[in-house]
Amino acid sequence: MVEFADSPFHDNLNTNYIPTEAEIADIRAHLAPREAELARLSAAIQELAAKRERMEEYIQAHKALMCHSRRIPQDILGEIFLECLPVDRNAVMSAWEAPLLLGRICSAWRTMAFQMMPRLWSSLHIPLGFVAEAPDYEASLTAIADWLERSKPLPLSLSICGKFFPHPDSARACLVSLCEFSTRWVSLRMLNVHHEYYSILTKMEAPALAEIKIEFTHDFEPNPNADILSSTLFRTMKTPQITIIAQDTTVLIPESPFRWEHLTHLILSSPFDGNSIRDGTLLTHDVYRLFRGCINLQVVNLWLDADTRRRIRRDAWADDEELEQLQLTSLTSCTLGMGEFMPFLHMINLLEHTRMPNLAFFCTELAGDCELNGRLLRHVATSSPNLSEMTLDVRHSSPDLRLLPNNLDPFPNLTILRFHYYRVASQDFHDGITRYSELKSLIVDCNPFPVLQKLWIAGEIWTGDKGWLAFEDLLLCQTNSGAVHLYTYTNYPPDLPNVWSHAARGLNVDIVPYHIYSSTPWDGS
């Protein structure tokens, strides 16, 4: 043991003393054997550290034989791998996400993921801008092909995004490479793609394809004779669920008579730009021709508008116009949205030229005229007696429902009724006092829904103190429905009704308030 007290220079240590030349020589002689001892100890420490490291490696190598992950059965490990995949989108070619990430853990996991689990590779999202404009896009195409090869023989779910407008030749080569796997497509989504890119796929046969969604770019102006809805791709689909989003979808429907028996599920809409009211894309005559030519339609979701801006085609329903009434016996779900400039009378005339006897779900918008609203509800009640679920969108300008005629035809099988209130940015919230009072008048006093079980009230509706009193009055009058769901804007904390008292009489009340806070410096705003 080395002690400072044993040093001949003990009294001068940790002071400002300056040694003489003779003393420096004595200090060096005094330190020489101790420096040699220090070197010996350092060498011994390094040797021991190396032994310790080798011992640790030895122990860890043997402990690895006992680790739990090594003992997990392959079927359970495979389920864990599948749970690592994204659930709200297709997988991407990123080394930081499954399934590629799973191959970077160990050779056993890589072998299992890459060679034994095709389900890991059965979905893929492809951004054309990233792939087609890569420095070596051919290597990217090879990587995509390898990915899809690993998924054999399972169905494929693909999504393609063309947002960055890649070089046409390389983008076309990417799409052509995907066509080699068309027989295994089960879901295909194309977002922000030019219609020329989509035309590459129209002649492909995809018998397993069940769902396709296409969102064209804003410059969507295909040739009037373009083969889209009647293309080979759509005709060979297993159960066609087709969604097309474009600035103008009228060009998809031919002027001349047609017969498309392959279409069963169809959504035609415009891009949503964040406004409360989506622009319509179809004229009522377009919808009529679509209904007449697609006799097997089961589910439709269409957005309509008037011919006031982009088109010159006529959309007037003359009183003396002779049009046959269409029997849409296959239709079970119908959603008809309205653009901001859509005359409601056109919608009424369209519906009155159709009968949907097997319709189970119907969604549309109420007009700014109570007489037209009554006309709409009467027709739906009589032409669709099997209707069980209905959603009514209510604009800020919609009239008081208490002004509806009292002699509305009943909906004998309607069990679920939804009211969705919305507004444009410059308008105030719907007044809860008025809206709840008019619902009470419609549902309780008129009572056209004798078997109603669920009432949904949602949207941009303001419920203040007096609004809660009106809502409470609505609840007290509910004798038929078994559940009332309210999604409302309100002050915090709201003086909520006593839901337990209503639950005791069999009424399930679900209230979700959207709180509005005033900004303060503590909010960082």
Image: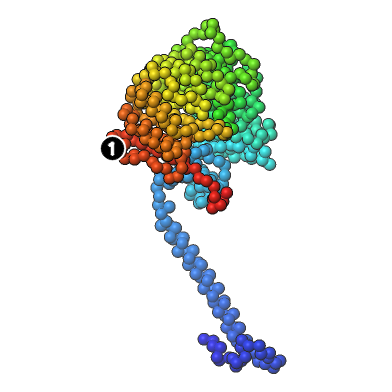
**For the point 53% across and 23% down, which residue is it?**
338
Q: x%, y% of residue 250?
A: 59, 19
**For the point 41% across and 29% down, which residue is it?**
437
Q: In the image shown, does 461 or 3 lie closer to the viewer?
A: 461
Q: In the image shown, does 118 or 520 lie closer to the viewer?
A: 520
**For the point 56% across and 24% down, which residue is it?**
339
Q: x%, y% of residue 500?
A: 31, 40
Q: How many marks?
A: 1
- Mark 1 element type: helix
Q: In this view, does 20 lie to the left or right of 355?
A: right
Q: In the image shown, does 333 or 425 lie closer to the viewer?
A: 425
Q: Mark 1 points at which residue?
A: 504
| Residue 161, image quadrant | top right
The residue furthest left is: 504
Tell me the colour scheme of the image.
Answer: rainbow
Q: Is residue 453 above or below residue 522?
A: above
> Is residue 239 visible in this depiction of the protein?
no
Q: In this view, does 23 lie to the left or right of 103?
A: right
Mark 1 surroundings: few (<14), some (14-19) or many (≥20) residues within 10 A: few
Q: What residue type is labelled 1?
A: Ala
The residue furthest front is: 466
Q: x%, y% of residue 312?
A: 64, 16
| Residue 26, image quadrant | bottom right
Q: In the image shown, does 520 or 113 lie closer to the viewer?
A: 520
Q: x%, y% of residue 39?
A: 59, 80
Q: In this view, does 19 lie to the left or right of 332?
A: right
> Is residue 439 visible in this depiction of the protein?
yes
Q: In this view, does 20 lie above or below 188?
A: below
